[in-house]
Amino acid sequence: MTTEHLDRLRPALRRAGVDAAWISDPANVRYLSGFTSGEDGKVLVTPDGATLYTDARYTVQAQQESHLPTLIARPPATYQDAAAKVAGLRVGIEADHLTVAAYDDLRAHWPDATLMPLRGLVQALRVVKTPDEVAQIRAAQALADRVYAEVRPLIRAGVTELSVAGEIESRLRQAGAESAFEIIVASGERGALPHGRATEKVIQDGELVTIDMGARLNGYHSDMTRTLAVGRPGDEMRRVYNAVLEAEEAAVAAVKPGARAADLDKLARDILTRYGLGEAFAHSLGHGVGLQIHEGPGLRGTSEDVLEAGMLVTIEPGAYLPGMGGVRIEDLLLVTESGHEVLSRAQKESV
């Protein structure tokens, strides 16, 4: 971990009209400090430095992971140490994370500081990844692709959704990663559930099966969905699959710097609408991926985000038909200077 992320933050603080920032969101703590247990840490950024605060459980870990000076203490000692550093300063606090109780504690211990709420300031910096972050996510996706290829032959009639999810999770762990989120395995009629987590349902011949999976490796996430056929599905679900595939490939092809997120969503949605599936596309087209599985930019119809080189985004149109089934196909893309690179290489099947 270098100081590059802190270097990005300081101009943003000035633009926000604050002198310092108290960072409490776990992902943002990790982003700025390298400390992997961000849920038990805070970072104070001042005009002339930055400090990681955590407790004695993490003395060795903080020394090993963080490039920042570290104070090992619990509140109120943490607040008391920071009080002298923030006296007379305008201190930004993460309003979308800090609890009311923690805010009251800061006011009590920092009487000479002015607390100013900030929303999404560090998250906005995280939207464009550094080369190191891109490499981490690329590695996570390559691992997920490999695990999917290993598990694909095991997905057949007579096995349960849970057994498939278990194989994926086990193989991710054996490879040194963990699941980026609760794995979705939704077969047959359950494919109509966008978040159809695996159950004891037995996969049947002639069903489509949706697999949504990702790897978390060194804190960074990947995300990918494939819908596959066990046997030969009926004509209607084959039609739905091919419509979703067309929408997905068209949206992927349109990803480039300067592309408006809302326009990408509309492109895919319009294709599905032409097939009578517009209402069946029940979520946004995609999202950013990084230290969190869902982060900016947001690829939805109301988004004002514009793609930039260095962003990592998913493209994942779907169609969900209650009582029949569903289809989602998702790729993970890096926005490049000249267009995009598809990081998810797992096979998309013909049905």
Image (tube, rainbow, N blue to C red):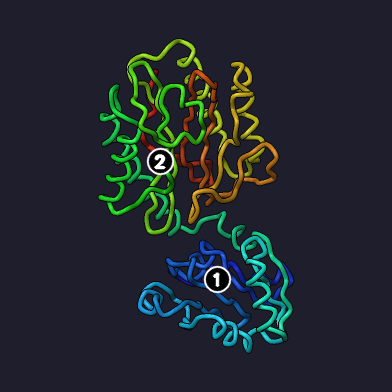
Where does residue 335 sit, x and y in percent of width and height? Answer: 52, 45
Tell me if label 2 and label 1 are in contact, CB under 8 Å.
no
Rendered view: 277 above or below 131: above
What residue occupies the far front of the structure in this picture? Answer: 200
Q: Image quadrant for the N terminus?
A: bottom left
The tag on residue 72 is: none
Q: Nearer the viewer, mark 2 or mark 1?
A: 2
Where does residue 288 sit, x and y in percent of width and height? Answer: 54, 47
Q: Amino acid at mark 1?
A: Leu
Q: Quadrant of residue 100?
A: bottom right
In percent of the image, x 39 and y 28: which residue is there? 348
Label 2 SS: loop
Rendered view: 77 above or below 199: below
Q: Amino acid at mark 2?
A: Ile
Q: Earlier in the sequence, mark 2 or mark 1?
A: 1
Mark 2, residue position: 183
The tag on residue 6 is: 1
Structural distance between the alpha carbons of marks 2 and 1:
34 Å
How many numbered marks have been drawn onto this rendered protein structure? 2
In percent of the image, x 54 and y 21: which residue is there? 321
